[in-house]
Amino acid sequence: MSKPLLTVTLNPALDLTGHIGQIQVGSVNVVKSGSLHPAGKGINVARVLRDLGADVAVTGILGAGNQQAFRDLFKQCGLTDHFMTVPGDTRINVKMVEDSGDVTDLNFPGVAVAEDELKEFEARLLRQAEQHEYIVVAGSLPRGISAEASRDLIAKLQQKGAKVLFDSSKEALVKGLEAKPFLIKPNEVELAEWAGRPLETEAELRQEAEKLRAAGITNVVISRGADGVLWLADNEWWSACPPRMEVVSTVGAGDSMVAGFAWGMSQGMDKEQILRLASAVSALAVTQISVGVPNKQQLADMMARIDVKRLG
C-alpha cells in the first residue's frame, strides 16, 4: 500500500473571488457573483489529490483568528489536518475573474511567523516527513519565513528521503531551486525570471530546463497554459497539449497539474500516463470555478484527448 501524500502551504489564504464582465481601473466595478473560501496552492493540490483517490495530509501555518473555515474544509474533504496556528489572521486574497478568463489577483500579506514558531513548525514537518514519500511544497511565503529558510526546509525534507514537488515563484522559487527538489513546475514567465532573459521559443525553454536538470533537479515541468506542458524527466523530453477548452477560470489549473504529477508518480504510472493525467486534470480545472475532479468519467474522456509525445 502506498504511503499517504503530504502538501505544505506556508501562506494559505481565504480567497474572495468575484466574477465581473471587465475591470474598469479607477472606477466603481459591480461584481456579478462572488464567494469566500479557504485556499492556498498546497491546499488546492490536496483537494485534487483526494478526488483522484489519494490518502492526503495537509500542513502549513494558519492564523488563529480565522482558522475555522480551513479546519471545516479539511474535515469536509477528508484531509488529515496537521496545520499549526500562530497569532493573527490568515490573509484574504482578492481574485477578480473577467468574462475573458483573465484573473487579477490582489494578494495581501500573510501572518507574521516568529523565529521560535518557525522552528516548531520545522520540527513538526520533519517528523511528518517520515510518514510520506511524496511531499508537495507550494505557494508563497508569509512574513518571517525567508526564501533561504524555505530552501533549507526543502533540503531537510529530501534528506529525510522524501521526494519534494516544489511550486512557487519569485525569490522563493529562485532559492528553492538550490535545494534540488525532485520536481519543479515553473511556468514560462517564472522560468524566464529565473533565467534572467526572455524565453520566447520552445528551444529556449528547453535550454534553461537542461541547466536545471544538470544542477540536479530530476523533473523539470514547464507549464505553458493553452500550449500545454513540457517535461524533462531524467534525460527524456515529453510534451502534452490539451484540446482547446472553454475557459471559466484559470485559478487552480497549475495546482491541479502538480496534483496529477504527484498522484501518477505515487502510483508508479509510466511517464506517458503521468503526463496524460496531469494535463487532463489541469485542462478540466479551467472549465470550472473551484478545484477538484468531481467526475471520473469526464477525467478519463479528457485523458484520451490529450496529445502526448516523446520528443527527440
Image (cartoon, grey):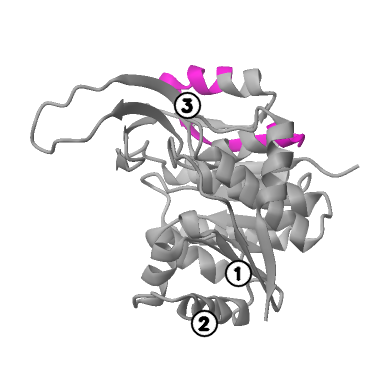
Viewed as shown, does residue 90 lie left or right of 230?
A: left
Query: Residue 276 at what x, y percent from top left?
Result: 70, 54
What range of the chain is rendered magenta? 51-72
Residue 289 is inside the magenta segment: no
Q: Which residue is mark 1?
A: 180
Q: Amino acid at mark 2?
A: Gln
Q: Marks 3 and 1: in contact by CB < 8 Å?
A: no
Tell which of 46 and 256 is nearer to you: 256
Choose between 180 and 203: the one closer to the eye.
Answer: 203
Decide if residue 161 is in sight here: no
Instruction: Name the residue carrying label 2.
Output: 207
Whether residue 78 is visible here, answered yes or no, is yes
The answer to whether marks 2 and 3 mark residues whose Cβ atoms lie closer than 8 Å is no
In this rendering, which labeled residue sits more in front, label 1 or label 2? 2
Identify the disc placed on residue 38: 3
Tell me which amino acid carries mark 3. Pro
Residue at image position (86%, 44%) is 2
Magenta-colored stretch includes residue 66: yes
Judge whether 133 appears above or below 301 on screen: below
Residue 56 drawn at (x, y percent): 71, 35
